Structure formats: C-alpha cells, structure tokens
Image (cartoon, rainbow, N blue to C red):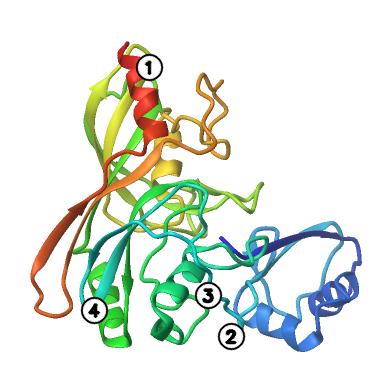
Amino acid sequence: MGDEYIELELNTPGERLDKAVADALPNLSRAQLQRLIKEGKVEVDGRPAKASLRLEGGEKVLVIRPEPVGSELTPQDIPLDIRYQDDDCLVINKPAGMVVHPGTGNPDGTLVNALLYYLPDLKGVGGEKRPGIVHRLDKYTSGLIVVAKHDRALWHLQDQFKARTVKKEYLALVHGLAQPQEAIIDAPIGRDARQRKKMAVITARNAQSRPAQTHYITRAAYEEYSLLACHPITGRTHQIRVHLAYIGHPIVCDHVYSRRKQAFKLGRQFLHAARLTFRRPSDNEEITLSAELPPELTAVLFQLAG
C-alpha cells in the first residue's frame, strides 16, 4: 500500500541487472537503484536478485519503489470519529475510502493528515512519514485503528502487536455458506507471482511467503452468504481477504480477490474492524473497544434478512 510496482521485461542477454534496469528506468538514479537492489526490492522472475546478475534475456523484472519519504505532511481539517482517547493514544473509527497515510496516488486526505490537524505534536512520532501509526487498515476497510501520541506509547503498542497479544475482530460478509462454521485457516501468504500488486497463498517449497493464520466463526448464515467474525492471528498484508478467497468464500465486493458476480452496489468491500483489545501504555490495563457496522453494510444485512 503506497509503494509503486514497476514491471519490466528485459531482453538484454549478457548485461548486468543494474545496468539494464537503469537504462529502462532513466528517471531512477543509480544510487536509488543500488539501494533498492540491496534491500531486495528488485526481483527477477519472482526472486530478489543481485546487481551483478547477468541476464539471459526475457526475464520479468519487478522494481518495488517505496513511497517517497519526506516531511511535507500537511495537516488537514478532516472529521475524525474518535472512540477512545487518553494521554498516550487514541482509537479512531476509520471510514471506508480513507487511506491511512500518504503514498503514491494518495498525497493527502489521509488519516495521518487529519491526525496532524487534531494533534500537531504528533509530527515526528516514530520518525517516519507515518507519525503515530501502529498498524493499518486497507483503504476500503472500515473500523478501529489505534494511534500512538508519543514514541514511548508507540513502542509499547508495537511490542503488543509483535507479541500477538492484541485481539482484533473483523466482520466480513462472504459468498457461500462457510463449512465448517468455525475453523482456523493456516496458509502462508506472499506476493502473487503473476500480479505483483496482489498477495496470494503460496505453499510451494522455498517460496517467498510467510506463515499466516486466521480464525473465523460464522455469526449468521443467509441463503448464499455468510457473516463471519474473523480473528487474524498473524498480521500479513490483505490476510483476511486472501485467506477467505483461498477457501472459496471471497468477501462481498472485494474487487481484487473476488471474481464473483456482485449483487450489491457497494463502493467498498464488506470488511469492518469491529473490535479491538489492547493494553493501555499508561497502566498496562486491558481495554476493549467496539465499532458498529456502518450504515451501508447494515443495509446489506437488512436486505439479506428481508
């Protein structure tokens, strides 16, 4: 999210990878290219490669260019639905359609821009272009997201996410009747080799994927749909969306991971971060917050129930 993916097909047999990519992307400086290669962000046929690699011709090359990092973040007066706040953190109910932080194609209008207007001292927390951001939600996913107000709180919350002690519950309406009604999906996730902007379940030996587990339980069953409560055990990119599509129950109106005909006119996927449990940085007390389904998703359930 926010990164730029540049796909190339190089037909320069015998040439070094760095020179061939530099010739193909003249706007990318040699220093930038060398750094990307060193960081593993230049892949040849799906795998990170060295600058000295000699090409045979016909290789498919992917250059992953991170969003520009800078300090030109602009505070913007954008309404925030604040569900909790103390001296260390606040929890926002993010609407669908709002990007968490600026990136390629989304220079402003993000949650970070809104936060900087509400909390001017937030700038610089974490030392990145994502001040205070502990975790993220996809653009078209709504629900709860916690934000740290200072570095100590950021580290405390980050440690909880790394230790997997933060409990998250998402509500997802999926195609079909989930069987079994409760299960743990245990399938590694990595970048899709054919469509590099997507993630996919990749089980091949030596694949570039990471372990991922999602627990789900059926909350309601309709004639052709199921409402699932999903609890991600790990935190991979697009994890719930990828896992549910993998078991044959893609999320309704997920136009990236579902090929099903959509019966509802939603400008978003039916995925909502409904509950969040974490320990407050101030006293380590566990708190649980919830956010009701937004009206456009509630309307879909009413339609199904009727």
Residue labelled with disc 2: 71
Residue 192 to residue 243: above or below: below
* Percent x, y of residue 130: 48, 75
Q: In whole angstroms, how far apart are the C-alphas of marks 2 and 4?
A: 23 Å
Q: Are marks 2 and 4 in contact (CB under 8 Å)?
A: no
| Quadrant of the rendered image containing residue 36 | bottom right
Q: Nearer the viewer, residue 231 or 106?
A: 106
* Of the two numbered discs 3 and 1 in the rendering, the one whose residue sits closer to the viewer: 3
Identity of the residue drawn at 22% across and 29% down: 219
Identity of the residue drawn at 62% across and 53% down: 197
* Of the two numbered discs 2 and 3 in the rendering, the one whose residue sits closer to the viewer: 3
Amino acid at dot 1: Gln
| Quadrant of the rendered image containing residue 148 | bottom left
Does residue 8 appear left or right of residue 272 in this picture? right
Residue labelled with disc 1: 303
Does residue 306 appear left or right of residue 137 in this picture? left
Does residue 67 appear left or right of residue 118 in this picture? right
The residue carrying pointer 3 sits among few (fewer than 14), some (14 to 19) or many (20 or more) residues within 10 Å by Cα, namely many
